[in-house]
Amino acid sequence: MTVEIRIPKLGLTMTDAVLVKWLIGAGDRVVKEQPVCVIETDKVTLELEASGEGLVHPIVEPGRRVAVGEVIGYLAADETELEALRAHHATAPTGPKETPAPKKPEKIRGATAMPKKSAGRGRILASPAARKLSTTLGVELKEIFGSGPGGRIILSDVQRFAETMRSTPFAGGYDIATVAPETELLTVAETIAIRGVRKIISRNMMLSLSRQAQLTLHTEASAVALRDMRALFNTSLEEGQPPVSYNAIIVKAAAQALRRYPMINAMVDGRDIRIWKQIHIGVAMDFGKGLIVPKIRNADTKSIQTISGELNDLAARAEKQHLVPDELWGGTFTITNLGNWDIDHFTPVNNFPESAILGMGRIVERPWVRDGIVVPEPRISLSLTFDHRIIDGALAAELLKFIKDRLEDTRLML
Amino acid sequence: MSSDKQTLLEIYRTMVTVRRFETMAGEYFAAGQIPGFIHLSIGQEGSSVGVCSCLRKDDYVVTTHRGHGHMIAKGADLKRMTAELFGKKTGYCKGKGGSMHIADFSIGILGANGVVAGGLPIITGAGLSIKLRKTDQVAVAFFGDGAANRGPVHEAMNMAAIWKLPVLFVCENNQYASTTPMHYACSAGDLYTRAAAYDMPGEKINGNDVLAVREATASAVARARAGEGPTFLENVTYRLKGHYEGDPQKYRTTEEIEIWRQKDPIEHFGRMLAQKKYLTKKHAAQIREAVQAELSEALAFAQNSPFPEPGDAMADLYSNP
Amino acid sequence: MSERILTCSAALAEALHEEMRRDESIFILGEDLVAHGGVFGQFKGIPEAFPGRIIDSPISETGIAGCGVGAAMTGMRPFIDFHFSDFLTCGMDELCNQAAKIRYMSGGQVKLPMVVWCPDGAGLRAAAQHSQSLEAWFVHTPGLKVVVPSEPADVKGLIKAAIWDDNPVMFFQHKKLFAKEGPVPEEEYVIELGRAAVKKEGRDVSLLCYGAAYYLCLEAASTLREDAIDAEIVDLRTLKPLDMDTVARSIRKTHRAVIVHEACLTGGFGAELAARIQDELFDELDAPVKRVGAKDVPIPFSPSMEDFVLPSVADVLEAARAVTYR
């Protein structure tokens, strides 16, 4: 039986994806769960696995934007079925070469309607007035989400986009020769388009630093109790079970702190402050494909072991690009750990639109004065960046102290 | 109505002018210098010149696609007529009308008309205008036996009759509506009898006898000026040339044409003038030479005139935009 | 400027009284005018005030139109009453081949100051041969001007301009609007041909209309306001010459256009206007130009069918919502 290969809906807001490349040649055999192709949404890049065994018949060429639910190819059970498919659906080129994904309309804040099926298929649909205004304002239509029929970009889309852009300069958007003419003397080694995950990061970083009043507090804590607690967890590991990480313990401490200080588990929305009921803590991860921040949902209700298990799972799938978009958004607080790279102190940037982020350095033995005597002690640096518009310095300091206390005396977490 | 020698010689000269003008037009059309198509009234000069010889400058005429004779007889300028035929900027219509649409409102020529019978409702309107303005002008519509069968003729004649308008309906029955013989297309055989239906005087006249036409017209004009209403004149004549220049004329025989050539109105009138000793052969030759000189001048004027600029096409549509 | 309330008919009659008093060359010609002051009472008082200058004609539309042409080029200012605009077909040669072209064909030798007054429009259960809106035919004929007023004040001001225009002017008045009342200035005034009027200002969509469709737009605009759609109403008033400047100003503001007329859609004036808008204002448009008009059938007799065929307020609302993406 012939099985269709469709673009799956991988998250609440996902409406389409770019087919980046086929991993299997036309007519080649795949087995169940073997990756068939790579797709890229505006949140993640991931591999699509075969739902069963069969011969692949691709019908969409790489580089095309495809709507959720649309058929991009088929799995034929045998050669006869494959022949029948070829007769009805032209075989799309697969090839090893990676076709760059076309620039796509990003969903921007405020543009509410869903993109329609035809949006972004080659020609950008836009009303003449929208085109004219975009030219006048110097914004690119491909950046703008169309809310009109068939995904047509209409005047109000451009106006809303321009409004956002006015207050949110994008990292790109300028011509380097005009801001730094001397770069003409340099030779380009490589050009990489800012798109996909990089674009999201870029915009979010700019939003974060341009729209919040960020301030960072630094402190450090004794890591003795922390180290002991982790060791304790890991002495009773079952066969094959990954060890509990420091991150899991710190996520738990942070979740408790946020429960205690709800104003920090909050965001600015227009002229209001929204304090969230849920505590969803993101943990920044980087596997060389751009920073991603998978979430531990309702972290305050979960045990350290559970949190640790989830983190391990998220990390494993993130490394293989198997995360789905819903696992990447909707956080209320973030922690970021640069200890692996021997960083002691740093100033994290809020994961916009969240209002605070906790940064951790490495755990390292330092001379420490205790009871008048210099002793070696494992120490961990902590930094808390927060949005000073809604979080006062003392409150932020209290939260940081709350975490520090629990790391230094882990019994407080029980 | 004056019938002195001078007047009659003037009428003769006008007939010759019409004939020579149209002969020249036919030649230059054949030579490809006149664009489009032209309709000649050669053989019908008795009617056109006879009628117009009774009109004042401020009287109105409307004519047809076969209107050169009426215009020349009403006093149109030969230079501007010729230039218009050649499509030149100096023509009566600045090249916008051509042979079929020549007009000179300054001498009461309300225009030739490309639509058969198109002039009749217009002349009734001119008649109504005369009546409302209370002047003693008359308004004359020339039309053919073909036009006589169109509906507007009925409406125009009836309206002119009920309002007693100073209008002359001059039907030049030249025997053919394009290719269709008059005896085929007109049920009653005669056209003048239709006037009775409008309680309007109607008269059948030998259109090739310029003096007969003149006499009938004079009395109709007098009735009109006196406020006694319209008159219908059927001037029976014959067009010696085709419907248009280049017409294969398969609808008639050369014998028939030859019979009518014997009744040529100009030769007929010339013989009469000779009998009266008003016109010698020498004098006739002088008239032809003088007319030819005038036409040569008109031709030179037309040929030396510039064509309109293409963009001139956009002018003259509205009096005020 | 002080005002009083007049009907469209009274506004027309008043204008004619004023101008016929002013100039003896103006006369009225048509069918059934004297006995009742016109079949719609549109010439009330004129037969008494101007005897001999309002003339009953036989039922001869060809002759009437032709008389207008002949009189216009011989020093008169005829006002031709066409009884029902549907009968224009009987005078087409006189209007389109003669009146429209004679000045041009003669190289600009003559003026044709002539008003062709045509009661038009549907809604009176008068069926297919007494209900049409034929203005587009005449817009398509160079040499004619075409006026289609809606409100009484427009009727008065525009008919004066039409009378004093030196060209043939087709003047269409909707039969259903004869009794329509509206304020008319006390003082004498003329509304220049080729000037549209912004009858209601708005930001979101331009309703471009003329004649009876103006009232559809007026009603639609008040409903749209409840949906927070702020409609601008441009009453074109004159279709030829067309006031494209006012149309352009409106569309540059609203970026959306709906053209509304009672005439059937295909080949209607809306098609011409839409074409010009896309050509001249393409970059201003945020939505395709929508047209609202009657369905492409002759006007049927029975009320249920006639109402179905004619454009409605609901049609205007639907089009306005479509172009504003609501």
Image (tube, coloured by chain):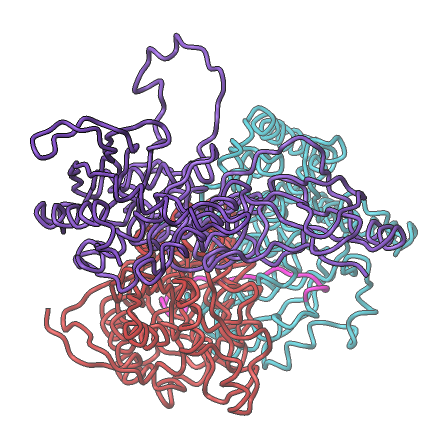
Q: Would you say B69 lies left or right of B111 here?
A: right
What are the residue bounds of the magenta stretch? B130-147
Query: Considering depth in this image, is A130 or B28 the residue closer to the camera?
Result: A130
Q: Residue furthest top?
A: A185
- Check if residue A204 falls in the magenta segment: no
Position of C15 relative to B78 (above/below): below
Q: Residue B31's x, y, as percent? A: 75, 30
Position of C301 relative to C206 (above/below): below
Q: Tell me the red chain.
A: C
Q: Would you say C202 lies left or right of B197 here?
A: left
Q: Residue C135's x, y, as percent? A: 48, 67
Q: Residue at x 25, y 66 (%)?
A: C200
Q: Residue at x 69, y 32 (%)?
A: A96
Q: Colour of chain A?
A: purple
Q: Residue C305's x, y, as percent? A: 55, 87
- Tag count in the figure? 0
Q: Colour of chain B?
A: cyan
Q: Residue at x 47, y 41 (%)?
A: B314
Q: Residue B243's x, y, as percent? A: 77, 51
The picture quadrant where one finds residue B195 is bottom right
Position of A12 relative to A28 (above/below): below
Q: Would you say A176 lies left or right of A97 here?
A: left
Q: Residue at x 25, y 56 (%)?
A: A413
Task: Please say whether residue B240 is visible from this viewpoint.
Answer: no
Task: Please say whether residue B81 is visible from this viewpoint.
Answer: yes
Query: Considering depth in this image, is A190 or C45 the residue closer to the camera?
Result: A190
Query: Considering depth in this image, is C323 or C110 the residue closer to the camera?
Result: C323
Query: Considering depth in this image, is B267 or C151 the residue closer to the camera?
Result: C151
